[in-house]
Structures are given as C-alpha cells and as structure tokens.
Image (tube, helix red, strand yellow):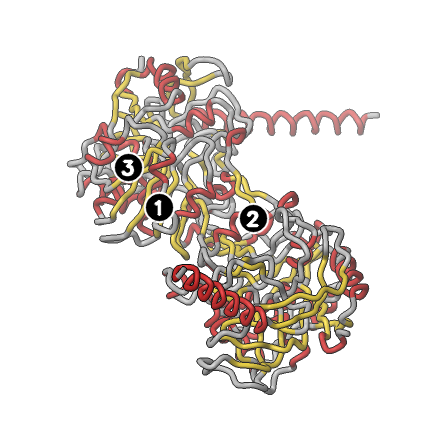
Amino acid sequence: MKTIKSYSTWILLILFFISMSAAFAQNKTEAGRIPAKGMAKFSKDGNFKPYEFTRHAVGDNDVLIDILYAGICHSDIHTERDDWWSVKYPLVAGHEIAGRVIQVGKKVTKFKVGDYAGVGCMVNSCGECEYCKKGEEQYCLKGNVGTYSSPDYFHNNELTQGGYSNNIVLSENFAIKIPRNADLKKVAPLLCAGITTYSPIHFTHVKKGDVIAIAGFGGLGYMAVQYAVALGAKVTVFDITEAKQQDALAMGAVKYVNVKNQEELKGLENTFRVILSTIPAKYDLSMYLKMLKVDGDMVVIGLPAFANSPTIDVTNLVMAGRRKLYGTQIGGIRETQEMLDYSVLHNIYPKVEIISADKIDEAYQKVLAGEVRYRYVIDMSTLK
Amino acid sequence: MKRTIYLSILMAITLFVTVSAQDNRIPAKGFAVFSGDGQFKPYEFTRHAVGDNDIEIKILYAGICHSDLHHVRQDWGKEEFPMVPGHEIAGRVVKTGKNVTKFKVGDLAGIGCMVNSCGECEFCKEDKEQYCKGVVMTYHGHDQFHNNERTQGGYSNNIVLTENFAIKIPANAKIEKVAPLLCAGITTYSPIHAVGVKKGDKVGVAGFGGLGHMAVQYMVALGAEVTVFDITEDKRVAAKRLGAVRYVNVNNPEDLKGLDNTMSFIISTIPQKYDPSIYMKMLKLDGQLCIVGLPATVNAPSIRIDQFVWQGGRKVFGSQIGGIKETQEMLDYSVANNIYPEVEIIKADGTAITDAYQKVLEGKVKFRYVIDISTLK
C-alpha cells in the first residue's frame, strides 16, 4: 500500500515536470513568434476579412520581410475557392510578394535590413533530394513548402499563410533579391507569372526567328509574349476574343488568332516549334498539338479547375505523332533570381492595377469573369 | 461524219487501254473478313498492274498485328469490307518494273504499314512518310496513285507496290520471323532511337506483347536496364529471358512500390484501358513517356491536363511506326543483332486466322502469330 502511494507521488511529480518544461518550451517559442495581420477567407464561399495570426520566429537563416505589394494569381482564386484540393480556413493566399527586409537571422548573408526581397510560390524544400541539389526545388521529392496553405515541415507542420498580409518570415535561401532599380509595384507578379513563363521559354531554347505560339493571353500569356519577343521569336497569340488583338500585336506578336473564328485557324497545322498554353479554362488540346511541328513541344502551364480540365486521350497523342506534351511548374530558386534580374534589366513587367487591401473580393470577381489583361496587385500599405 | 470517226477511234483506244490495263492487273487470293464479325474466308481479288517503278512480291509470311484486330472489329471507326488485313509482310520479288533499281527478281523484300505517300510534302522529304497526309496504307487505305482503289493487305499470296516503299531483307535473315519487324519492330525501334536510350538508362516497357517484347530487346541491346510492366504473372519468365532486370505485375500493388521518379524513358505498348499517370509518375524530371499502343477508341485512356502540370517536366508523346529509311535501318540492325520477335507460325487457313484473332483478343498469344502464306491453297 505504502509502495503504491510513493509510486503515484513520483509519477505525479514527473508529470508535473514534464508539463512545466513543455509550457516553458511553448512560451519560449511563442515569445519569438511574429504577429501578422492579413486578409483571409474563412470559408469557400465567404468574403475576405481581416485576420490576425502569427508566423514562426525568425530563425538563424531566416529573414522577416515587410510586405509592400502582393499580386493576385489565378491559382490563389482556385485555392481560396477550393477548386483543387480541400483546404483549411482561414486561408491567407498570395505567392507573388515584394517587400523589404526588416530583420535578419544571425547566419543570414544574402540580405541585410533595408534590402528589397521577393517571395514566390515556395518558402522552403527538403534541400537534400536530387532536384533540390539541382536547383529544381519546385520538384522536391519530399514536396516543397508552399508559400500558403502548405504544412511547413521545418516548423511542426504548421500551415503556411501567404502574402495578402503585412509580413512574412522565411529562409533566406527562398527569398529573391530585387534589384534597387526595379519598378517595385510591378515586381510581385514576376515571382509567379514571370517565372512560370520565363522557365519553359528558356528551357525549350526559344531563339531569334523561332515560330512559336502563346495560347491564352491573360496574366501568364502577357508575360510569355514579352519574354518570347525579347528573344526575337515570331510569336502567334491565341485567345477567344477580339478585344486582345491590339495589345498582342502592340507587344510584338506577329499574329493574333481568335480561336472562336474557325477561318483564322486554317493553315496552322504543323507550324510551331513550341506552344505555351496558359489557358485556365476548358479547351481542345489536340487542336494545338496538331499545330506543332514534329518533335515540337507543347508546354502546359495554365491550370483550370479540375471540373473544367481538358483531357487528351492516348489515341490523339499517337495520331499527333512525336509532338510532345508536358507541363511545367514555376522554376527553381536560382532560375527565379535569373528571371528577376533579366526582367528588370529588359524592362519586362506585367501590366498591373494596384488595389487596396479591402478590394480583393472585387478583384477576384473580375478575374473570374475573364477579360482581365493585367495583374491585380494589392498595395499592402493600405492594410488596416 | 468525220467527228464520229474520230470519236469512235478515241473510244476504241480508250477501251483498248482500259482492257489492257485490266489485263495487266495481278490476280491475288487471300483471306478477308466480309463484315465486322471477324470470320476469315478465302477471297479472290486483283491488284494494280506492275508499273515501271513497282515490284510484285510473292508473300511468304504475314504477321498478325493487334491493330489488324482493331480494324477488323471496327474499333477505330467504320471500315469497308471485304478487308484483307496484314501490314507485316515478308516475301520474295517475282517481278520488277523497268525503272526498278533497288530490287531484282529473287530478292527478299518486306512491307510495313505504308505502300506509298505523296513524296512532296516536308514529311516525305524528311523521310517521315508516316506523317504525310497523303500516305497510302497497306490495307484499309485508298491508293491515290491508282484511282483511289482500296488497298488490300498481306494475308494474301502477293502484293504490288512501288520499290521505294519496299524494304530490302538481308539474305541471311530468319525470314519466318522478319514480318513483324515491319510494324512491331519499327514502331518500337523508332522512338527508342529518337530519344537516344543508352547504356545504363533506367527504362520501362509497359505492355509485354508483340510490341513490348521488341522494345525490351532493342533497349537491352542498347545496354539499358529494362523494367517490364504487364498485368499477368504468366510473362514474368519471358521478360527475364529477354533481358529485363525487373518484371512488375501492375495488378500487384506491392510490385509498384518505390518506382516513382526512377525512369528516364517508358514506352507504352498497352492496347487496353489503363492509367497513364502511374507511368508519368515513374519518370524522372525531363523523362519521357512514349505511347505507341492504340486501344480501341471507346477504351482509350485519357490524361487530364493538370496531371501534366503536377508531373511537371515529364514529357508525353505518341509515335507512329517510322519512315522508310528508318525502317530499312531497323531491319538491317535487327538482323545484324539477331533481334527478332518470338513467333508462332500458323497455317493460311480461314479458321486458323479466326482462332488466332480470338487468342490475341484473350491475351493468349505468346507474342506474335505469323501466317505461313506458302500453305495458302
């Protein structure tokens, strides 16, 4: 009897110490956490509302960025509307981020306080797999840590929150240096729309005189045309409206095709070496495949909602004969830096419309309605 | 009056030309299906005359390709009957037109899926005749150079075609095994060589039938480490025998573990419904999935566009046979390297062909049936 009693005392004592040390550790972490505020959706159908939360502490290799501008990407809308996978709310989207470094961890070498920094779709990755080592972190075998709505396996798997907010904390390795002379309010969309188009245009080695096509002339298409024209390619633009023709030609496209007009599609089979599809809606994939030359590449970067995704059956692939079809995701960090430097140097920017932080719902509506040729960028200084 | 005479002379000449052309037509006999029921019966017909650039081939062997079944069963759309299938043909030249230089009487010659093409488009000029819009298929085609008459294939005693589309078969070839090279061989050889498979590459062959067992041999010959995928245990031993390092029974989920992101190239020869994305996931970044298997249209698997994005940098493409120049290269290479299909020889008999089709359909064919045309009565 006495033995049992003393055992239970010991057990209680041990439990007490365990809980104390846990609380202490908790306190210590909490103390370093960074308070943040942003605009979040609290449900699939709800509107954006102010949301206060915290971000993980600034670790030795981390930087804290004061966000100045955040772009609105079509995939933010897909995610916020739960078009792809089940997401958890509240959800602060935003993976096109431009800001200024306001705190650096003690081992940080790439940035100092006051530098401009950008963040794209990833904030970390395993760093050890073959693709991380190659600088293709977007294809990390463990999965990269996405900028929002992604479990951060370096921080207890807490879900990341994105750039529609006043700050962000991340490893310096995943922050991009923004040149001082950049047109800052236009930089944010380069971190997603820019790299997503720059990467395939460069890895397919588009060069002077190449006959290529850009399908879909929205945010991504607008960037793609600029990169391809800068390289001297002969660019044909495809879209489903007459309204964008002038802009496309003014940007240096040699031809504009309104896909809704059958006549304009004639004679285009077996024409292009590369077709980049940025279309975020349902469309006929094999129509474009047939326009490729043999051994040509059709690179898909537009991602429609699953319910609206076009499909291609293997018969059409065989019939199209040696026309390659594949997708690509953004680009690695090294390439993103290269893209940003290149874009600033060549004055390649998206067309942006700056909105205040309380206008995100309206902007989403307009993007969903189509016809937006510019990128909405939220001026984060307007966040209350 | 004068006019009538002229007209009569003209008519007489026309008649003479027509009749003599008819006279020069080559009588042929073979096995045809007369409807989509798949029953083969003897069929007598004629082939166009041997033109100056043509050769007439006495057919010795004809392979049975899975796409013959698809055509007969109208899996890809409505067909015209009677139809004599067969686009894997090996035989001997018995007559040559006066301008023919590539062949002489007595030479062995092979024919694949095409018997002619426009000769003028960029594809024809680049030796990719298979992509020519005016290509004349060996059967189920219309011959634009001969009044658009329907072509008939190799389950028959002879065939006439331009020498340009006939392939020289080396005299030392194992002639009874050559026929399937003309379709199954070139269809796999072409993309394997186009993507540059090389020693040490980790590659896959999905579907281990007529095409698949050729693909394994070509890639083993190049020194690649080949994994074979099929849906049965029955083919495990044969895959190893042909040099595969691994055999995966796709119906066994355990077998599939650990294969994601491991291969640089996969060739899919599967003629049924399947999930292409499992193979896309097995590719490494910049790896390529080449599709050469053609299921019936109703069974064709499809790939949703986002799968291309999630499996970013993994390239998917289809491929059709190969050009004539490459087919010759393939045949010479195959014979030199002793690469042949494993064949089961059957008699040229309506019942035997009908039975063989049933076995192919049920997946019971070892690899390739070849009809011994010398047994045709």
Q: Amino acid at mark 3?
A: Tyr
Helix, strand or loop status at disc 2: helix
Same chain shared by disc 1 and disc 3: yes
Of B215 and A19, the residue lying toward us? B215
Answer yes or no: is residue B93 visible.
yes
Does the image show residue A107? no
According to the picture, the residue beneath numbered tag 3 turns out to be: A256
Q: Nearer the viewer, residue A101 or A278?
A: A278
Q: Residues within 10 Å of mark 3 (few under 14, many from 20)?
A: many
Q: Say which chain tag 3 marks.
A: A
Q: Horizontal and vertical percent for residue A208?
A: 22, 53
Name which residue lies at 50% across and 72% down: B162
Q: CA distance from mark 1 to mark 3?
A: 14 Å
Other residues around mark 2 within 10 Å, as few (<14) / some (14–19) / many (≥20): many
Residue at disc 1, secondary structure: loop
Disc 1 and disc 2: Cα gap in Å? Answer: 24 Å
Give the residue at the far right of this rendering.
Answer: A1
Estimate the x, y position of residue A314 in percent, counting from the top left: 56, 48
**What count of labels does the image hold?**
3
**Nearest-to-viewer mark from 1 and 3:** 1
- The local secondary structure at tag 3 comes to strand
Residue A341 in the image, given as x and y percentages of width and height: 22, 43
| Nearer mark to the viewer, of 2 and 3 | 3
Q: Earlier in the sequence, mark 1 or mark 3?
A: 3
Q: Position of residue B288 (x, y in %)?
A: 49, 56
Q: Residue at x 75, y 74 (%)?
A: B376
Q: Chain of mark 1?
A: A
> The C terminus of chain A appears in which quarter of the rendering?
top left
Cβ atoms at labels 1 and 2 below 8 Å apart: no
